């Protein structure tokens, strides 16, 4: 058997060589057919042990109901980013920019109740109103409660049966339309010990407006997670492409009592004096830096009383000279004690981020058997394509992690960390990230293509993951740096099978030359024109960064065309990989198989330079959406460019794959392409699979599509 990058082998016999045979206990959340957390179980594996739907009957699945999210306001008509939870016979989710909460009948898709927060000015200022990923559910004194953090940064507790705000919970908000109970304004808890607020002379706190514009803004993207009676709230803020200043609020992590709404603790994501990591913030940047968020959902180990959270970097990501140092706890995986908020351990996955490498997916928790030793593990995927694995109790790496030197900045006043961490095992999702476009990865489908690609690449300095932007103009003999990444993003999270220790991760390949940084001549810039607007509203214009008034103000490339990495008549200079799906045995760190998902796009297959050439399958466009249920790995694809996998009638497909080999065993059409995620539950003796779906290209609304057996 020949074993290559895209496979452990085609033969079924070979598959058994590649699979582990270890059992593993799954964390709480999916017992008795429930889907109690955003990621199914507390460990966010997006896996369920349900087996009623299996390979023998998968092709008989039928649509049970469709729940449309476009009925809940404009702005998210074609997207559905929220994975529902299922508890007590009801599905709970959010929809629309207002993040309206809805309870849905699990058998019929009927809306049972909805709840919408009263409008405030600070909601209108929210930089991430359209990224609500779901709700949290918990039982308090035998009563089901839904917890939601809103775009305006309020925390709500709702009765799961009625949707009404919980009585005798939280603190009254002195605003019109707000109830006297069931809500907490989290901004006062966030800023009450924050130095810029303590020195603020612009008037008292305004609960309608929120944080003064001159100090920053705050929001929430992922829902809270409830662990051992504590509601752990994650914070969000201005995305990299929308940041308006180098100063902002730090986006600390907070804990509230699930029973009363009382504020319990706050973890400073930017360490204060005397706290571990404070010395990694030079130039007194800890005083005013902020915007360090937790975009991705959290996971938890209730037995150990730990919650696991990932962070991104601080303001501003393209230029870091204003905040020199490695900047803990940016780009980190944190394990916090859920009762106290104290740090149990951490690992900084990337230092002093200037690449927008924020960690996009929740930590995955499962037990592994490594070298005959049982290890409670946490596995973290990254945008770059690196996979990190730790003992989730101690933080010790399961396999060695090496610090490797990286390319240093040439921009005057900028800062680059000397080294970055690289796991020695598992290997990256895409090995191109080790050293970039080496000859192995140069497009070589014809000798002429390879010649032209090598000619283009000879004019650039090719690196791996951490190539910094260059100043413009610069005096190097090469045009620009080129870096590659081969990981995943928020739109296609990984999943895992706790019974075997196998992790499944979608991935795609991207190599680019970063934009140049242009001196300001000492002019200070504070962007206000894009604050609170999505990137789509101004993408393609010159991007002006906030500055310190001393170095860099413009993030330019569109009008400096020679700085880009050229294509060959539209073909990349590297071998394209648009969509792959890899499986890893995390007990050994070995890659089991790696398959392209979908078919090579027509623009590549029919390219004039490839006439008569058989091109290896590059995978199709869109992102793979995954779920583990019973013996199956379910997969569908997003309709990113209108080329999602489809049947002869043009309907998108939902596949059942063999968990051991990746082979497609059965497929069924679904009415709307998938996006983001799936979930499954057992209701009244029937198993249902719910696909998050939507397609702007097909004019199909953001929806939940539920399938079940006849």
Image (tube, rainbow, N blue to C red):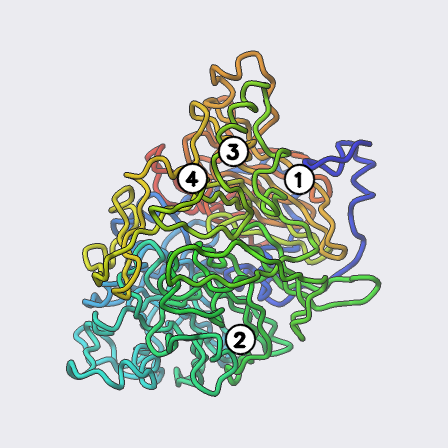
As drawn, the label of residue 227 is 2
Quarter the C terminus occupies: top right
Residue tagged by mark 3? 458
Distance between the alpha carbons at the discs numbered 4 and 1: 34 Å
Q: Nearer the viewer, mark 4 or mark 1?
A: 4
Q: Is residue 137 left or right of residue 575?
A: left
Dot 3 or dot 1, earlier in sequence:
3
Q: Marks 2/1: CA distance?
A: 35 Å
400 or 69, nearer to the observer: 400
The image position of residue 643, as x and y in percent, is 45, 29
Q: Residues within 10 Å of mark 3 (few under 14, many from 20)?
A: few
Q: Nearer the viewer, mark 2 or mark 3?
A: 3
Q: Is residue 493 left or right of residue 101?
A: right
Asked if marks 2 and 3 touch (Cβ < 8 Å), the reply is no
Residue 213 lies, in percent from the top left, at 21, 69
Q: Residue at x 62, y 58 (%)?
A: 404
Q: Earlier in the sequence, mark 2 or mark 3?
A: 2
Quadrant hosting residue 135: bottom left
Mark 3 or 1: the one toward you: 3
Whether residues under marks 2 and 1 lie with C-beta atoms below 8 angstroms apart, the answer is no
Identify the residue under disc 4. Answer: 479
Q: Nearer the viewer, residue 567 or 31?
A: 567
Viewer-nearest residue: 690 or 135: 135
Q: Which circle's residue, 3 or 4, is located before the other in the chain?
A: 3
| Residue at 83% across, 36% down | 13
Asked whether the residues under the numbered discs 4 and 1 touch, taking CB atoms below 8 Å apart as contact, a structural biologist would say: no
Question: In what element is the residue under mark 4?
Answer: loop
Name the residue at 43% across, 26% down.
570
Nearer the observer, disc 2 or disc 1? 1
| Label at residue 594 | 1
Cα distance in 3D space between marks 3 and 1: 30 Å
């Amino acid at each position: 058997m020949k074993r290559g990058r895209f496979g452990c082998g085609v033969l079924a016999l070979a598959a058994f060589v590649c699979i582990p045979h270890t059992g593993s206990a799954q964390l709480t959340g999916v017992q008795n057919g429930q889907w109690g957390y955003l990621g199914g179980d507390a460990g966010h594996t997006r896996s369920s042990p349900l087996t009623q739907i299996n390979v023998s009957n998968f092709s008989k699945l039928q649509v049970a109901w469709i729940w449309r999210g476009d009925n809940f306001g404009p702005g998210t008509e074609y997207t559905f980013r929220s994975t529902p939870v299922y508890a007590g016979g009801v599905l709970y989710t959010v929809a629309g920019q207002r993040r309206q909460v809805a309870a849905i009948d699990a058998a019929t898709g009927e809306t049972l109740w909805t709840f919408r927060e009263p409008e405030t000015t600070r909601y209108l200022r929210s930089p991430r109103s359209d990224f609500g990923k779901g709700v949290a559910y918990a039982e308090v004194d035998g009563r089901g409660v839904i917890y939601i953090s809103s775009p305006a940064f309020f925390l709500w507790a709702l009765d799961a049966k009625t949707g009404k705000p919980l009585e005798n919970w939280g603190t009254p908000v002195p605003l019109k339309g707000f109830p006297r109970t069931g809500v907490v304004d989290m901004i006062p808890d966030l800023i009450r010990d924050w130095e810029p607020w303590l020195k603020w002379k612009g008037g008292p706190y305004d609960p309608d407006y929120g944080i003064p514009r001159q100090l920053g803004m705050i929001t929430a993207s992922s829902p809270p997670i409830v662990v051992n009676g504590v509601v752990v709230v994650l914070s969000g803020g201005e995305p990299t492409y929308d940041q308006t200043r180098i100063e902002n609020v730090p986006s600390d992590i907070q804990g509230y009592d699930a029973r009363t709404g009382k504020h319990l603790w706050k973890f400073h994501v930017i360490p204060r004096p005397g706290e571990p990591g404070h010395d990694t913030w030079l130039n007194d940047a800890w005083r005013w830096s902020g915007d360090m968020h937790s975009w991705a959902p959290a996971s938890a180990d209730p037995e150990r009383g730990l919650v696991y959270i990932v962070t991104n970097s601080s303001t501003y990501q393209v230029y870091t000279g204003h905040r020199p140092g490695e900047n803990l706890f940016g780009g980190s995986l944190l394990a916090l004690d859920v009762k106290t908020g104290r740090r149990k351990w951490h690992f900084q996955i990337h230092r002093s981020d200037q690449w927008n490498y924020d960690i996009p997916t929740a930590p995955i928790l499962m037990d592994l058997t490594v070298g005959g030793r049982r290890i409670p593990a946490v596995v973290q995927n990254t945008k770059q394509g690196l996979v990190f694995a730790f003992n989730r109790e101690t933080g010790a790496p399961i396999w060695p992690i090496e610090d490797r030197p990286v390319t240093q900045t040439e921009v005057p006043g900028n800062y680059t960390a000397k080294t970055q961490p690289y796991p020695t095992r598992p290997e990256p999702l895409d090995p191109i990230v080790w050293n970039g476009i080496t000859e192995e990865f140069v497009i070589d489908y014809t000798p002429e293509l390879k010649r032209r690609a090598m000619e283009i690449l000879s004019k650039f300095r090719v690196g791996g993951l951490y190539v910094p932007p260059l100043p413009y103009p610069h005096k190097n003999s090469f045009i620009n740096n080129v870096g590659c990444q081969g990981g995943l993003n928020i739109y296609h999270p990984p999943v895992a099978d706790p019974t075997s220790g196998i992790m499944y991760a979608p991935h795609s390949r991207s190599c680019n030359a970063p934009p140049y940084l242009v001196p300001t001549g000492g002019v200070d810039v504070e962007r206000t024109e894009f604050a609170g607007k999505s990137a789509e509203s101004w993408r393609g214009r010159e991007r002006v960064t906030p500055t310190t008034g001393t170095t860099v103000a413009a993030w330019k490339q569109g009008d400096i065309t020679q700085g880009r990495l050229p294509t060959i008549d539209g073909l990349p200079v590297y071998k394209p990989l648009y969509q792959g799906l890899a499986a890893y045995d995390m007990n050994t760190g070995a890659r089991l198989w790696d398959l392209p998902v979908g078919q090579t796009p027509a623009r590549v297959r029919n390219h004039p330079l490839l006439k008569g050439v058989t091109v290896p399958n590059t995978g199709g466009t869109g992102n793979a959406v995954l779920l583990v249920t019973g013996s199956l790995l379910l997969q569908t694809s997003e309709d990113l460019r209108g080329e999602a996998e489809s049947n002869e009638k043009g309907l998108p497909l939902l596949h059942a794959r063999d968990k051991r080999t990746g082979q497609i065993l059965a497929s069924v059409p679904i009415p709307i392409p998938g996006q983001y995620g799936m979930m499954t539950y057992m209701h009244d003796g029937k198993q249902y699979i719910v696909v998050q779906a939507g397609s702007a290209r097909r004019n199909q609304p953001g929806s939940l599509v539920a399938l079940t057996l006849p």
